[in-house]
Image (cartoon, rainbow, N blue to C red):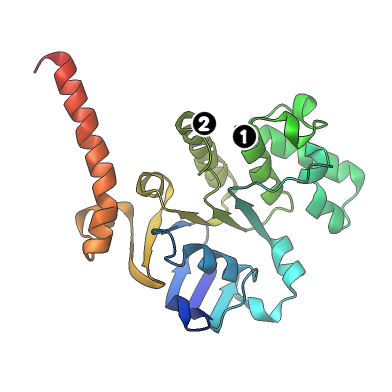
Amino acid sequence: MIELQHLTKQYGDQVAVRDLSLEVGDGELLVLLGGSGCGKTTTLKMINRLVEPSAGVVRVGGDDVSQLAPHELRRRVGYAFQQVGLFPHMTVGDNIGITPTLLGWSPDAIRRRVDELLTLVELDPDTIRDRDPAQLSGGQQQRVGVARALAAKPRVMLLDEPFGALDPLTRGRLQDSFIRIRRDLGVTAVFVTHDMVEALRLGDRIAVLDKGRLVQIGTPRTLMREPADDSVRQLLDTPRREARLVDDLLSDGTGT
């Protein structure tokens, strides 16, 4: 569904992404993982041409995205990000329905789609549809952001740390919801995060980036068992430390 071939992005003398090649299968969720400045968000934005590559090719559904008008491409690819970016002067329903409106859907079709999506992200349409974004909690706003990204029934979703600003409990609930939604809809997704635990939980495969280059790509199990180098091994230390801490606390609590 998504192909990146020798993708490179350079800003002056700085190379943000270096000769990156990978594929994302139909219905797969690929996580782009790495620390700040590793090139993961730049890579994501090159897929839907928010950033133009310096070299290389991006294909979505077999189409070279450089041959598509940017607005046409972005209507075919859902995009959700941490800041949500809901328009404050528009209701929740209008925010979700903005792309179908641009595509010329009828008002009745838009209304049905808005209510369908609000239900899908576990929000009550009658309660939420006509509210302003400022009246929603952070978790509710993020759910609306996901609904908006799905509004035009895209086959591909791009998500840039969409749950990163949320508290752990809300974040966990939204991760659970997203897992269910993606599987129900069969959407292909690329998900950016710097959180190894989130990557292990959500990803069918994980692509680890470091200084703009692809270090390793594989299933969560493969990365845990066979890290390619020290940079991957260090990322894996976090979930291991957290697991050991929980085990230690539980052992202390039982007196063993």
4 up-or-down from 156: above or below: below
User: Considering depth in this image, is 195 or 30 the residue closer to the camera?
Assistant: 195
Spatial CA distance of label 1 from label 2 is 9 Å
Direction front: furthest residue: 13
Q: Which mark is residue 23?
A: none
**Are dots 1 and 2 in contact, CB under 8 Å?**
yes
Upstream in sequence: badge 1 or badge 2: 1
Q: Is residue 57 above or below residue 121?
A: below
Instruction: Tell me the amino acid under the disc marked 1.
Output: Gly
Quarter of image, res 115: top right
Seen in the picture, residue 150 relative to 43 is either above or below; the reply is above
Given residues 126 and 211, the one toward you in this image is 211
Residue 168 in the image, given as x and y percentages of width and height: 45, 33
Please report the residue visible at 65 percent of the width from the left and 36 percent of the height from the top.
Answer: 120
At 18% from the left and 16% from the top, the residue drawn is 253
Q: Residues within 10 Å of mark 1 (few under 14, many from 20)?
A: some
Secondary structure under tag 2 reads: helix
> Which residue is label 2 attached to?
170
> Label 2 is placed on what type of residue?
Thr
Q: Position of residue 158 (x, y in %)?
A: 58, 57
Q: Residues within 10 Å of mark 2 (few under 14, many from 20)?
A: some
- Residue 36 position, x and y percent, is 43, 59
Residue indicated by mark 1: 138
Outermost residue toward the right in this view: 107
Q: Residue at x 15, y 15 (%)?
A: 254
**Which numbered mark, 1 or 2, is in the foreground of this view?**
1
